[in-house]
Image: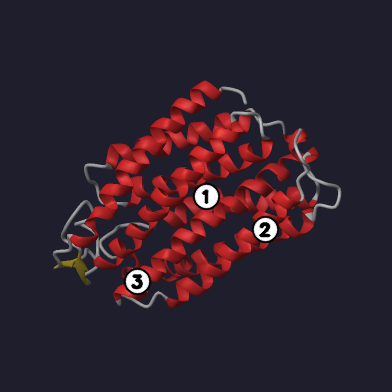
Amino acid sequence: MENKKSIGIFVGIIAILVVIAAAIGIASINLKNEFEFTTIYGDVVKMYGGGIYRMHTVAQVYQVIPHDMVNLFLAVPALLISFFFARKGILKARLFFMAVTLYLMFTYGIYTFYAMYNRLYICYVAIMGLSFYTFILTLKGTDAVKAKELFKDTYPNKLVGGFLITASSFMTLTWLKTILPTAFFGTMPTIDLAQSTTMVPQAIDLAFVLPLAFVMGIRLCMRKPEGYIMGTVIPAFLVFMMTAIFSKGLMLQITGTADGGGTMVIMGTFALISMVVTMINFLFMKRES
């Protein structure tokens, strides 16, 4: 593994910062002190009022705390374990490691740009930046031809590529359903925005993640080497992301804050499909010597 010393330092810092940020976030669960707030759109919303997320709505906090739990209890162990094996030169582990760093980069990009400014801001920025450089360094040191050769001849590349194309298209249409009415009719999704002023997750998805998934799905169907890298990375990334979003719906449902049933069904289904695709990817990889 190239640059393993630098990457190892980055991974250590990322793990420590994620533990700190996630633990502080989770600790907010018993600090609720609700108050009403009138947004710039004139809507009255209930603010959480306690802990690191005190300036977020109750519904937002009951979504971000489960995300913190996924970061702490799933992402950090996955990051450390996959890096341990990746640094030994195991290509399978390297591909999974890239998926975890992509997840952390995306997640803390949302925290950086979407969370209300707080004392953990510098942690969010550091995790986002270090995850980005870790991902790029690892990707740069990954031979796409060797990645393609890792897969058996019977690998269902069109099935996995089709999944990437379908999933990215579905999510694109889902976000555009909310965004286009504003573009064409000037209507504002004030319920979704709450006290915020813009839509950050949708912007990151539409600008970076979804186009990448769509293009790499096509490249994988064409058996292009780079398609095999991202065709493995993106489904594994989606397992983490969809699990986090599913947990948000579950928390909303348990606390009775909002109806999280729809989110649980849709994102739970996406998580399961992503897990199946990820399993297919690794089952069709050859044994590394």
Task: Report the number of discs.
Answer: 3
| Of pointers 2 and 3, the one earlier in the residue sequence | 3
Horizontal and vertical percent position of residue 280: 71, 56
Horizontal and vertical percent position of residue 145: 77, 34
Viewer-side label of 1, 2: 2
Dot 2: element: helix
Question: How many other residues sit within 10 Å of disc 3, few (<14), some (14-19) or many (≥20)?
Answer: many
Task: Specify the amino acid type for callout 2.
Answer: Val
Instruction: Say which residue label 1 marks.
Output: 207
Task: Specify the amino acid type for callout 1.
Answer: Ala
Question: Viewer-proximal residue, 104 or 83?
Answer: 83
Looking at the image, which residue is at 29% across and 48% down?
23
Question: How many other residues sit within 10 Å of disc 1, few (<14), some (14-19) or many (≥20)?
Answer: few
Indicate the quadrant where residue 250 lies.
bottom left
Instruction: Say which residue label 3 marks.
Output: 252
Asked whether the residues under the numbered discs 1 and 2 touch, taking CB atoms below 8 Å apart as contact, a structural biologist would say no
Question: Viewer-proximal residue, 16 or 147?
Answer: 16
Viewer-side label of 3, 1: 3
Looking at the image, which residue is at 46% across and 47% down?
75
Horizontal and vertical percent position of residue 4: 55, 24
Task: Specify the amino acid type for callout 3.
Answer: Leu
| Of pointers 1 and 2, the one earlier in the residue sequence | 1
**Numbered mark located on residue 277 in the image:** 2
